[in-house]
Image (cartoon, grey):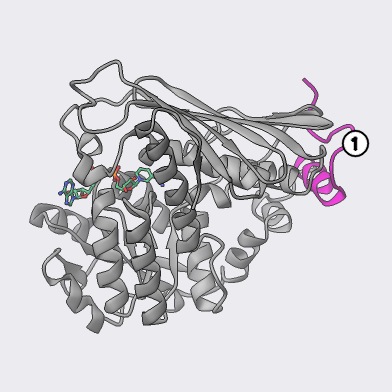
């Protein structure tokens, strides 16, 4: 397959220059800056010293915080790891040493609200099980902090609305951890679809699934996770459809399949769902905790584009009917956090606000409703 855009027949001139420059050896950061405005904000602030960086408090020191977010916070230009909130004293000790976090910036879930008095903390990043996002977002807003909340935003539409209202009342920004809105390949899919580079998108096929392990984890408990594969990773396929088509779905039909009713007693294992969009596009989506799948494909009137794999932390690969994409791999969490910190610093609204998380929960609730009603077509509120 020939390289994407290398023939000079690519979708737009600035992108062509981007790839040409890559091959002539210019720095990736400078190039990425030219192509992706959110990275430009990051670079502009690169000269800031640590005292001007925003202080982040991480709430929940599980796998994502430990392996992705904390390492990314060592690279961010606009924010740094200033505090932690944990229910495990041993983790407090370990993190305090590893990241040089002063005792006064360490909280537990009970005394978290006293963070209101802590000037070192500007924003709180909530990385807890899904059912706890609602409570901790509201408590953080009441403490006068900006909030970055992991996906899915919450377990219900009502909770999302309450979180948005709390942040609005506090005059603080709320962003959802949709890291792929800062990832070059996904941004390109969005641009190709929304700018109709290959004409109107007619069909999207999106899938995200993996084989889940430990049967005792919170992801398999309804009260903590809100749902199964759909809430956890199906949300990426849903997001992909929404940003490639650039519209909100009107209706949904859905079917659930369960091959292990013991392991998946409380939550969904595999769901297929279909969506109709106002501009005439349709989408067919898959999510699963039983099988690995990861793809975002869009067919338009005059061509197609695809990411496979599409949503992981790295190794995303893309191609179109014109050839292969050639974008840099970046740290999604670094880009996401630097962008949010920059939005706060410059008083600019985030591109991934609570409203974006709310829209997904509206579709997710409609998907579950369709399943309960035997696959009936359900209008999205
Ligand atoms: P995890 O299980 O590894 O960590 C969860 C943390 O919450 C742990 O530190 C645990 O001690 C704490 N916790 C507090 N109360 C708990 C309770 N009652 N039950 C279980 N744990 C409790 O989970 P994770 O993979 O870090 O996921 C955390 C959040 O991040 C979830 O909302 C998940 O959807 C999201 N996530 C997002 C991405 C992404 O790519 N953006 C990736 C993974 C996870």
In this view, the residue in front, 103 or 249, is 249
Q: Is residue 207 left or right of residue 97?
A: right
Q: Is residue 297 above or below residue 43?
A: above
In this view, the residue in front, 254 or 358, is 254
Residue 29, percent from left and from top: 64, 54
Residue most toward the top? 259
Q: Quadrant of the N terminus?
A: top right
In this view, the residue in front, 7 or 240, is 240
- As for residue 53 lying within the magenta part, the answer is no
Name the residue tied to disc 1.
9
Q: For label 1, count other residues whose C-alpha is less than 10 Å away and answer few (under 14), some (14-19) or many (20+).
A: few
Q: In this view, does 256 lie to the left or right of 138?
A: right
Q: Is mark 1 on a helix, strand or loop?
A: loop
Residue 280, percent from left and from top: 72, 39
Q: In which quarter of the image is residue 104?
A: bottom left
Asked whether the viewer can see residue 287, the reply is no
**Who's the residue at 27% across and 78% down the image?**
143
**Who's the residue at 48% across and 69% down the image?**
341
Q: Is residue 139 above or below residue 228?
A: below
Q: Quadrant of residue 87?
A: bottom left
Asked whether the viewer can see residue 231, the reply is yes
Q: What stretch is highlighted in magenta?
A: 1-23
Q: In this view, does 70 lie to the left or right of 14?
A: left
- As for residue 2 lying within the magenta part, the answer is yes
Q: Quadrant of residue 134?
A: bottom left
Residue 166, percent from left and from top: 34, 74
Q: In this view, does 11 lie to the left or right of 343?
A: right
In this rendering, the count of numbered labels is 1
Residue 264, percent from left and from top: 24, 26
**Who's the residue at 9% across and 57% down the image?**
89
In this view, the residue in front, 2 or 279, is 279
């Amino acid at each position: 397959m020939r390289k994407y855009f290398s023939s000079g027949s690519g979708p737009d001139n600035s992108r062509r220059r981007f790839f040409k420059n890559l091959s002539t050896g210019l720095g990736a950061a400078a190039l990425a800056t030219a192509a992706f405005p959110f990275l430009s904000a990051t670079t502009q602030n690169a000269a800031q010293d640590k005292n001007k960086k925003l202080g982040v408090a991480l709430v929940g020191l599980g796998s994502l915080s430990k392996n992705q977010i904390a390492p990314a916070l060592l690279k961010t230009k606009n924010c740094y790891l200033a505090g932690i909130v944990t229910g495990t004293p041993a983790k407090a000790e370990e993190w305090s040493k590893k990241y040089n976090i002063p005792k006064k910036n360490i909280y537990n879930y009970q005394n978290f609200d006293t963070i209101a008095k802590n000037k070192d903390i500007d924003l709180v990043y909530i990385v807890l099980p899904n059912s706890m996002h609602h409570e901790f977002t509201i408590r953080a807003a009441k403490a006068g902090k900006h909030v970055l909340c992991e996906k899915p935003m919450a377990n219900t539409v009502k909770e999302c609305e309450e979180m948005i209202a709390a942040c609005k009342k506090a005059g603080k920004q709320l962003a959802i951890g949709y890291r792929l809105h800062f990832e070059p390949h996904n941004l390109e899919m969005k641009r190709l679809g929304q700018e109709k580079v290959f004409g109107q998108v007619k069909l999207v096929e999106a899938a995200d699934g993996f084989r889940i392990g430990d049967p005792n984890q919170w992801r398999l408990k309804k009260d903590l996770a809100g749902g199964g594969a759909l809430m956890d990773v199906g949300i990426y396929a849903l997001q992909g459809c929404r940003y490639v088509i650039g519209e909100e779905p009107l209706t949904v039909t859905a079917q659930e399949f369960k091959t292990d009713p013991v392991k998946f007693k409380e939550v969904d294992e595999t769901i297929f769902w279909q969506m109709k969009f106002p501009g005439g596009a349709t989408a067919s989506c898959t999510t699963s905790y039983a099988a690995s799948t990861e793809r975002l494909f869009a067919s338009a009137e005059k061509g197609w584009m695809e990411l496979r794999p599409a949503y992981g932390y790295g190794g995303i690969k893309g191609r179109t009917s014109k050839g292969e994409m050639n974008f840099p791999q970046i740290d999604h969490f670094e880009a996401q956090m630097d962008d949010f910190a920059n939005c706060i610093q410059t008083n600019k609204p985030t591109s991934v606000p609570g409203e974006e998380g709310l829209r997904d929960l509206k579709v997710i609730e409609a998907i579950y409703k369709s399943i309960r009603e035997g696959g009936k077509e359900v209008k999205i509120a």
